[in-house]
Amino acid sequence: MSSTSRRVALVTLGCARNEVDSEELAGRLAADGFRLVEDPAAADTVLVNTCGFVEAAKKDSIDTVLEVAAGKDGGRTKAVVAVGCLAERYGDGLAEALPEADAVLGFDDYPEISERLRTIVDGGTHMPHAPRDRRVLLPLAPVDRAASPTHVPGHEAIPDLPDGVGPASGPTRVRLSAGPVAALKLASGCDRRCTFCAIPSFRGAFVSRRPSDVLAEARWLGEQGARELFLVSENSTSYGKDLGDLRLLETLLPELAGVAGIDRVRVSYLQPAEMRPSLVQVMTSTAGVAPYFDLSFQHSSASVLRRMRRFGDTERFLELIATIRAATPEAGIRSNVIVGFPGESDEDVAELERFLTLARLDAIGVFGYSDEDGTEAAGLDGQHDEIVVRERVERVSRLADELVAQRAEDRVGDVVEVLVESVTPSGESGEGRAAHQAPEVDGSTAVSGAGLRVGQIVAARVVATDGADLVAEEIVRAVA
């Protein structure tokens, strides 16, 4: 591969975990002399980091690959390569069904990504992998997993990195966004067996990153201009169980909050069944840790949850919420729910609506059930017609929108700390997020003030709302 054929662009779809994986791929490529470019049309090779979670995400991923591939004849692009969850999940099947992609690479190809791209651009071929259940690649006992040679994206340390690629220890990484928020991976995989979810089959069993690696990467992100760390994984409440300490997150959070340059730490992907008083206490009382609870309820009817192989019911979930708000009334709580699950009755939907009404959540994602390849739920009786699922999604979504708007209105008059992410040229107005608002999914806060700058955290009083979004006026600069 000639030195003039090293321009590469990454297009990232899906969740924040994929964003971290893209930055790891970018770091590996930069360390091997590739030049990263933002515009896919200006690249020799385009990596599309796909999402394989639900049907809509799969379609979006395939459409993106097709769109990028369609521009090859009119631009300099020589190869379009699919990576990420969809590529890992379907492997050679995706390659056969999507000949527009010049290659389909799985997670095991990531350590050799530079060599793979050189081969592809030079006209060579790459044999795509046959999909396999990645849960069986790691030892059954969590404490034995750290010694496994299986590659887990975002976990492998690479020494002797060039300047700008870091951190000094832990995985190589290059920031692809200059914004003040950076995702930081706590762990990968999941040991739960929810009947509707295929993620563990292609992301693998649960593996924690060592605290020293997480802290090293946090320090590096602080040096790179990050002000908020967004901790991501498939299940953050399990962090540390394979390292011999199930309460390791409670120890790690204060250390992360103390990292130079970092003003706020936010945890995502919490399992209600694994929430514990000590974690609630740390998340609601530690300076610099956002009192933000991304709780994966999925439903509140006990019968539906048992068919999902999940814990809880309306009353238990309300007790957890009450515990959180007793410690910090302003805490942000959000969740996703699935409607139309096999066997779900009208009474079950009504129970979910009762829970949502009483819970007063700050953000609610409503998803319609669809069969996922290889999941237990795909074979359950009581499957609903698509029109029934769609009607229930519309019904619960309308209620959710009303409830979220009401919860936002409850915050009028409150003082919130807003991390400014964009500003107008005059610096008199900007947009950012309060502590209860995570990137992409929970709304934002429009703030007015004087001399606002990206990366500042300003204290502002909420004066109006628009759905989940807040409008606030600065009252005092919280962080210079």
Image (cartoon, rainbow, N blue to C red):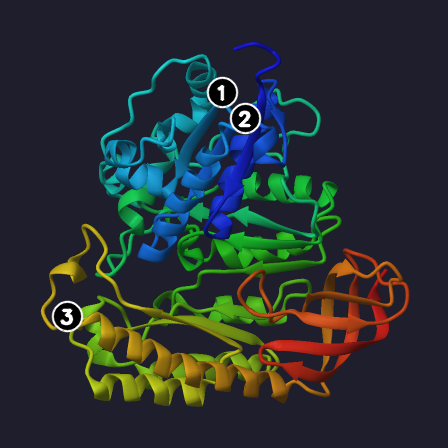
Residue 114: numbered disc: 1
Query: Residue 403, how many percent across, how many down?
Result: 49, 86
Query: Residue 307, how many percent across, how many down?
Result: 18, 70
Q: Residue furthest front?
A: 74
Q: Are marks 2 and 3 in contact (CB under 8 Å)?
A: no
Residue found at x 29% / y 52%: 191
Quarter assignment of residue 105: top left
Query: Residue 232, how many percent across, how many down?
Result: 50, 53
Q: Which residue is mark 2?
A: 28
Q: Earlier in the sequence, mark 3 or mark 1?
A: 1
Front-lying residue, 216 or 432: 432
Residue found at x 67% / y 39%: 220
As displayed, is residue 276 above or below residue 360? Answer: above
Task: Look at the numbered disc 2 and give the secondary structure of its residue.
Answer: helix
Residue 383: numbered disc: 3
Residue found at x 72% / y 41%: 224
Position of 9 compared to 238: left or right?
A: right
As displayed, is residue 295 above or below residue 170? Answer: below
Q: Amino acid at mark 3?
A: Gln
Position of 109 compared to 4: left or right?
A: left
- Label 2 or label 3, whichever lies nearer to me, is 3
Distance between the alpha carbons at the discs numbered 2 and 3: 45 Å
Q: Residue furthest top?
A: 2
Distance between the alpha carbons at the discs numbered 3 and 1: 45 Å
Residue found at x 42% / y 85%: 399
- Label 1 or label 2, whichever lies nearer to me, is 1
Q: Quadrant of the C terminus?
A: bottom right
Front-lying residue, 163 or 277: 163
Task: Look at the numbered disc 1 and give the secondary structure of its residue.
Answer: helix
Front-lying residue, 50 or 280: 50
Task: Look at the numbered disc 3 and give the secondary structure of its residue.
Answer: loop
